[in-house]
Image (cartoon, rainbow, N blue to C red):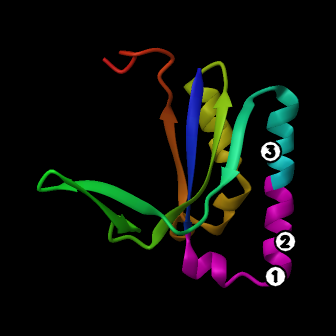
Amino acid sequence: MKYLMLIYGNDEIWGGLPDTELATLIGEVDAFNEALRATGELVDVQGLVSRPRAVRITDDVPVVTDGPYLEAKEYVGSYFVVDVAGEQRALEIARSYPGLRFGASSGGIEIWPLMASAGDDR
């Protein structure tokens, strides 16, 4: 089953990391991704540009707005998709993500099961 994992970050924490610590973290994330790629579980991984936009309908007119969309300090910094045997393995992968070591205030990971076909969520 495939799972989308959204990596949330906090600009204040990530922007405050010393260059050496940030480089170490990036190396750990690269190794994390390579390990998942080696097992065949990694489907896709991408970082996101932090200039989100939203399109909402206002009075039947699509309106484009800048993000972030919620009153939160966190933002979606990247995502990855894994194809694993079940939710337990997806949770295990999420728990081992290197960026989590900075604690709850640095963000977290949301895990979203992906539909294999229309109507899977009913």
Q: Which mark is residue 19?
A: 1
Tell me which corner region of the image, top left, top right, bottom left or bottom right, holds residue 34: top right
**Which range of residues does the magenta coloring cover?**
10-29
Q: Residue at x 81, y 47 (%)?
A: 32
In this view, 19 is above or below 59: below
Quadrant (top left, top right, bottom left, bottom right) of the C terminus: top left
Q: Disc 2 residue type?
A: Ala
User: Magenta segment, principal secondary structure?
Assistant: helix
| Residue 84 among magenta residues | no
Quadrant where the image shows the N terminus = top right
Distance, label 1 to label 3, CA atoms, is 21 Å
Q: Please give the name of the residue rendered at 48% of the width and 36% of the height, measured from the top-left corner.
A: 112
The residues tagged by marks 2 and 3 sit, at their Cα atoms, a distance apart of: 15 Å
Query: Which residue: 52% across, 40% down?
Result: 111
Q: Position of residue 66 (x, y in %)?
A: 39, 70
Q: Which image quadrant is residue 64 in? A: bottom left
Q: Secondary structure at mark 3?
A: helix
